[in-house]
Amino acid sequence: MEKLPYLVESQQLSQELIFELFKRADTLRKTPSRTLYGKVLATLFYEPSTRTRLSFETAMLRLGGQVVSTENAKEFSSAVKGESIEDTARIVGAYADCIVMRHYEDGAAKRAIAVSKKPVINAGDGRGQHPTQALLDLYTIYREIGRVENITVAMVGDLANGRTIRSLSYLLGKFKGIKIIFVCPQNLCVGNDIKEYLTRHNVKYSEETDLAKVLPTADIIYMTRIQKERMSEEDYKKSKGKYTLNMESLKLVKPNSRILHPLPHVEEIDFTIEAEENDKRIAYFRQAENGLYIRMAILEHLLG
Amino acid sequence: MEKLPYLVESQQLSQELIFELFKRADTLRKTPSRTLYGKVLATLFYEPSTRTRLSFETAMLRLGGQVVSTENAKEFSSAVKGESIEDTARIVGAYADCIVMRHYEDGAAKRAIAVSKKPVINAGDGRGQHPTQALLDLYTIYREIGRVENITVAMVGDLANGRTIRSLSYLLGKFKGIKIIFVCPQNLCVGNDIKEYLTRHNVKYSEETDLAKVLPTADIIYMTRIQKERMSEEDYKKSKGKYTLNMESLKLVKPNSRILHPLPHVEEIDFTIEAEENDKRIAYFRQAENGLYIRMAILEHLLG
Amino acid sequence: MEKLPYLVESQQLSQELIFELFKRADTLRKTPSRTLYGKVLATLFYEPSTRTRLSFETAMLRLGGQVVSTENAKEFSSAVKGESIEDTARIVGAYADCIVMRHYEDGAAKRAIAVSKKPVINAGDGRGQHPTQALLDLYTIYREIGRVENITVAMVGDLANGRTIRSLSYLLGKFKGIKIIFVCPQNLCVGNDIKEYLTRHNVKYSEETDLAKVLPTADIIYMTRIQKERMSEEDYKKSKGKYTLNMESLKLVKPNSRILHPLPHVEEIDFTIEAEENDKRIAYFRQAENGLYIRMAILEHLLG
């Protein structure tokens, strides 16, 4: 089977490899494996993302590997000590067997792989991509719906700034019968690069503004947070609270549909804890857990 | 024997369990044990407490387990990405086998256990509790004095803001013949909740303002730091330096008494390094070391 | 063979021990070793230095040991919770088997060893020393040039603030036939303490201002960064960019000479990526990697 040298964008993943990773994730969920014993992962986070970082680190440890880590990688490139991403990747790649990098600039991961002697995983770069998030999203669809073809996916919220949206759209573009409905405030619509990609890959998409109309038709409702930190105060005010799922709107969701969210969520999700624990349509906590197993599968693929 | 599902407050600990943990801590001190091999602990610190965090993490590693960690958990609940404690506990509890949480809000740990599928240990929540600190305090009394009954304990300093004081009082309330003397600036006296608890549990307590009078009578002198960060500037000025132990006042302490402190100390302790190393009455560094073994015993109890 | 109880300054290292460590580093590079299984290293960084920290931590993990860590040790000694270095060393030394400490104050490591029951490694203290950096520098000279005697070393850049310069000078002073040429802006010249040490140890040194004249004569060109964070704005402006190596000046460097740099570099190095990958005279990335193996050897020496 093909073997990736690194993972920086969703487009790298073939259908065959995707299913191979899903299968392996299913196995790792049930059977402990120490396949990465003796290996060391470095997690370099230039912006904090504790959830993603802990997910990768736990994945590495559960495979028998070890981790060195920084929540504070920005210091590498600070005004005071200025160092290029390339130099950092070279040096850390000399110590560790793999680098997981989260960066605030688009394209940072690509710059790192140009020089690193060890595999680099892009754990989010600016408005760029976040391929392991997309893969765990798709893995969740696969487990919850039972297929990744012939499904209608509603993507809701901040579609302009979400790298998750970009990475997942690219991944969905690899499968047949996908229909995407973008539901977003007018100032936060999905970019042309994604639309063109979808057109090229024969994925049908439409844009809607009324969430209530979309809810009864979607198999997957993929909610996202309005990313306050990536927009102007004015844009935030226009969009905040515009698309919200609550106990009332939940009634519009089909019995076999699923609600996903890359988390953290804020006001765009407003369910009771009881519903979150008992209503099987609410899938985002299982989705988060899936991230652990899919990241184990990816680390094993790159390092094994 | 009973098995706790989590540890958020001192009241949960029965006499029987306390002695069981002491016994196990004594054993772990002498005999290496890898009982938590393959397990992963997550330490989520919403406010920094490097000492407590390193103590828990070393405990986990010495039991053969692994650790993922953040000193920066506040980012989880930041204005920008706002996430509830409940969501965080659910997600991290999906990756890791146990969560150790330090939080700046009273009651944070209780909110976490309401939803977490994995054991949560409260490593301090606001002005609330810090049960493992209380347990290591009591363990130190047990080792140093040879008993945890029929002792007189002077608690000195900031008794209003110290969760350590609350947790230790609750724990002492479980034993016979305890007498507590509270010595504190007028603006930092112990709360009514603690007094009522002690009354209910037949613990004698009194309040004194003259430390010199108390020193010759106490078996345990439990010093605390004035917690500048939890009070107004004015309150701090009133209290700072009011109760201090130095080489002079040390003369008033009985030969078999012990001085404890949850550390870090500042000006309320002013001994020479020689005294700290050679005078057996000064017990706070042994107390800190005891924390390692008692936390190993607790982790093993919850996870083993 | 002699066994060090700690490592706080270069002067502690004898010629015999240095070669022993080089030999062991050579072996560890090729052969996995789990000699520190069951041991725990604590890395206490009072100022961030992710590169150095990750290097030590990876070294410990690759020897089978474990690590607890803080990037944020300054909190220990913050205004709020004020704790002395001595207390911190005592407490952390009670948990862990070894402490690696980076501190912003000269002499911090010496204060720690005065009380710590466990070995302390100085990973840089203010303008003081950084002995493992010096050792990895010398190890790089040994591997690249094939000897550590009879060589001419040009030290270039900020020689006033660089503890690396101090530690390496002290180390070179132990060998025969060393000639050092200091090349620095007038406001950033090497200190008298170093000059006196070199004179005492019969090391010839000279001071030059024209880098172009020095390049053709040196076996080792040891570049350093102008440490903006350790000087006034005015001093920085005077020195910035004054001594730079680029593709043009590289032509002046002898075919068997080597360019070293403790990294991170900023504008004082300006080579193409191709040159950095293919020109064997550019040795600083190999130098960084050498740090991993030399630190493994040191950890093993102190803890084994």
Image (cartoon, coloured by chain):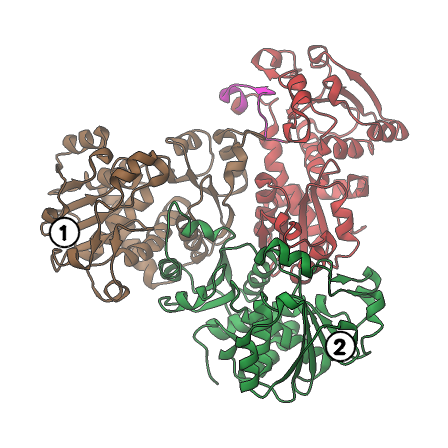
Chain colours: A red, B brown, C green
| Residue B117 versus residue C144 in the image, above or below | above
Disc 1 crowd rating (10 Å Cα; few below 14, some 14-19, many 20+) is: many
Q: Residue at x 77, y 81 (%)?
A: C217
Along the horizontal axis of the image, is C162 left or right of B286?
A: right
What distance separates the C-alpha of mark 1 from that of mark 2?
A: 72 Å
Q: Nearer the viewer, residue B58 or A4?
A: B58
What span is colored magenta in the figure? A263-276
Q: Nearer the viewer, mark 1 or mark 2?
A: 2
Q: Is residue A267 magenta?
A: yes
Along the horizontal axis of the image, is B304 left or right of A104?
A: left
Q: Is residue B78 visible?
A: yes
Res A97 → quadrant: bottom right
Residue A258 position in % (x across, y down): 65, 23
* Residue type, numbered disc 2: Val
Which secondary structure lies at badge 2?
helix
**Residue wearing tag 1:** B219
Q: Nearer the viewer, residue B208 or A92?
A: B208
**Residue wearing tag 2:** C214
Residue C191 position in % (x across, y down): 56, 72
Residue C162 position in % (x across, y down): 59, 66
Disc 2 crowd rating (10 Å Cα; few below 14, some 14-19, many 20+) is: some
Q: Residue at x 68, y 87 (%)?
A: C150
